[in-house]
Image: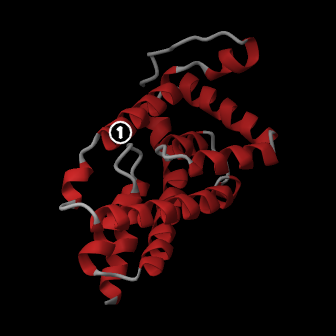
Amino acid sequence: MWLKYALVFISALAVDVVPLPLPPAFVIMIFLQIHFSLNVWVVIIVGVAGSILGRYILTLYIPKVAGKIFNPAKNEDVQFLGKKMKEKGWKSQLAILTYSLLPLPTTPLFIAGGMAKMKPYLIIPAFFVGKFISDTIAVFIGMYAAENTPSIIEGAISWKSISGLVLGVLLVSALLFIDWRSWIQNKKFKLNFKIWR
């Protein structure tokens, strides 16, 4: 039975270690919990732990990847954004917690934090609280939906999952293509598409 819980952990980690807006880890947690009739609380704890480790690893390697694929100006721009987040103190923690509670992809948050070279301990605690709460709600709602719907697969491709994916792509695009320094310092909205090396 512990191998099935290990699969939950590895699956959540694999989804959250990738810097692309993939389906959220809770979708996999719901599927595995229902498919193997696993204890819901163990699935939530193990799945959230896998997600946290995946996001932690993402924040460690994304600065190296970003330095190779984005030009120095874009890296400096996102690092500036990260410095502003650090300056906000508890307000940043509250923003991260709030963002983690929303049904939005958290990939852009960790890409920004990693590219800005923020220490993971500045992001992870608030993310953990938000992730635990939001995944718990999502898993219980998913269980209810699965028990009351003929097939969980039918609900996997819905307007919500597609809009979540589109929103994730838009958030990553905003992170990459908005000139954040110009926005924050001069209140001028500028787009910059010349970000690649």
Query: Height in image: 127 above or below 165?
Result: below
Q: Position of residue 65 (x, y in %)?
A: 45, 42
Residue at the outermost front position: 148
Classify residue 73 as left or right of residue 143.
right
Query: Height in image: 74 above or below 139?
Result: above
Residue lying at 39% horizontally and 53% vertically, measured from the top left:
24
Q: How is the image coloured?
A: secondary structure
Q: Position of residue 134 (x, y in %)?
A: 53, 58
Classify residue 115 as left or right of residue 160.
right
Classify residue 150 as left or right of residue 74.
left
In the image shown, does 1 or 58 lie closer to the viewer? Answer: 1
> Which residue matches tag 1?
165
Q: Residues within 10 Å of mark 1 (few under 14, many from 20)?
A: some
**Dividing the picture into quarters, in which one does residue 139 lie?**
bottom left
Q: Position of residue 49 (x, y in %)?
A: 51, 70
Q: Position of residue 27 (x, y in %)?
A: 35, 59
Residue lying at 50% horizontally and 36% vertically, measured from the top left:
67
Residue lying at 46% horizontally and 80% vertically, measured from the top left:
42
Q: Secondary structure at mark 1?
A: helix
* Figure quadrant of the C terminus: top left
**Dividing the picture into quarters, in which one does residue 87 lie?**
top right
In the image shown, does 102 or 174 lie closer to the viewer? Answer: 102
Query: Height in image: 181 above or below 66?
Result: above
Q: How many marks?
A: 1
Residue at the outermost bottom position: 1
Q: Give, as a three-letter code, the residue at label 1.
A: Leu
* Figure quadrant of the N terminus: bottom left
In the image shown, does 113 or 64 lie closer to the viewer? Answer: 113
Residue lying at 35% horizontally and 41% vertically, measured from the top left:
160
